[in-house]
Image: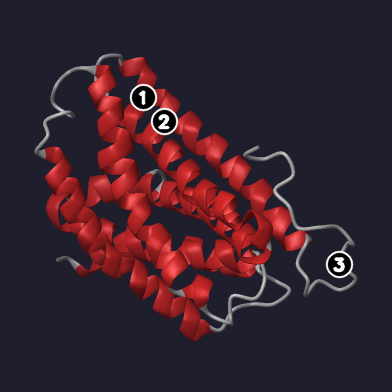
């Protein structure tokens, strides 16, 4: 592969990973843990691709039926990609002592998500070339970051709210799958060209929501000097 093309495919994921790392300003994570989670994200891209390949054999995407296309977006695309990233998050960093505040859920989820998006981008670069990679730098890669922030927010709540652990763990999978499915549905459908613009709106909405969640965990960090004396909660998001 062209070295320049490879670099352009890799850069968006690294930039987003760095930006999220910088938001964790009260107790930054060790570089080795971040690198391991990024590598884990790249590794889990492989089983996700196999799941999607199997799902594509169902023919729902090519049926021309919007209902079946939405099911394809939820089950084949949204579920197969988000479940692998989610399992990577809850089976590795979530279980470790270095996951010591809710904000860590967002940080490690994004590292895994960007590892996933980076390997996916490299595979797309090899197959489709420069034009596709430039478009994905502003669409698919940030979308993976948005889904990861939302997942990590709820997984972070689950870690430190044992009485609501399973509710938050469920929401940490449910919302990313749903948002991912809606985003892909608008891209994949070809019945109404104007509906593709809703994919952009979905990404903007998710980005705004994600930024609110980042600020919430960061402001409630137990490592923040004189942290506010309030319980860590999801307030009214996702209720």
Residue holding disc 3? 227
Q: Please determine whether, in this image, residue 113 is positioned above or below residue 138.
A: below
Coordinates of residue 143 in the picture (x, y in percent): 43, 46
Q: CA distance from mark 2 to mark 3?
A: 37 Å
- Name the image quarter holding residue 118: bottom left
Q: Nearer the viewer, mark 2 or mark 3?
A: 3
N-terminal of the pair, mark 2 or mark 3, is: 2
Which disc is residue 199 wearing? 2
Point out the residue furthest to the front here.
Answer: 163
- Name the image quarter holding residue 139: top left
Q: Is residue 128 left or right of residue 95?
A: left
Q: Is residue 21 left or right of residue 141?
A: right
N-terminal of the pair, mark 3 or mark 1, is: 1
Q: CA distance from mark 3 to mark 1?
A: 43 Å
Quarter holding the C terminus? top right
Q: Nearer the viewer, residue 7 or 50?
A: 50
């Amino acid at each position: 592969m062209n070295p320049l093309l490879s670099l352009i495919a890799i850069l968006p994921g690294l930039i987003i990973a760095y930006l999220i790392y910088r938001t964790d300003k009260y107790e930054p994570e060790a570089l080795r843990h971040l690198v391991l989670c990024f590598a884990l994200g790249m590794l889990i891209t492989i089983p996700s691709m196999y799941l999607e390949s199997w799902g594509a054999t169902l023919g729902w995407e090519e049926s021309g039926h919007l209902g079946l296309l939405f099911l394809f977006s939820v089950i084949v695309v949204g579920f197969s990609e988000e479940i692998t990233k989610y399992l990577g998050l809850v089976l590795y960093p979530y279980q470790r002592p270095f996951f010591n505040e809710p904000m860590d859920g967002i940080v490690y989820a994004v590292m895994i998500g960007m590892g996933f998006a980076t390997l996916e981008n490299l595979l797309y670069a090899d197959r489709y070339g420069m034009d596709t990679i430039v478009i994905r730098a502003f669409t698919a890669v940030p979308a993976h970051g948005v889904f990861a922030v939302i997942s990590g927010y709820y997984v972070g709540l689950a870690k430190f709210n044992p009485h609501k652990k399973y509710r938050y763990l469920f929401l940490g999978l449910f919302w990313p799958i749903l948002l991912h499915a809606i985003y892909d549905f608008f891209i994949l459908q070809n019945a109404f060209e104007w509906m593709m613009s809703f994919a952009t709106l979905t990404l903007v909405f998710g980005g705004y929501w994600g930024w609110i969640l980042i600020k919430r965990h960061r402001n409630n960090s137990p490592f923040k000097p004189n942290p506010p004396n309030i319980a860590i909660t999801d307030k009214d998001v996702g209720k």
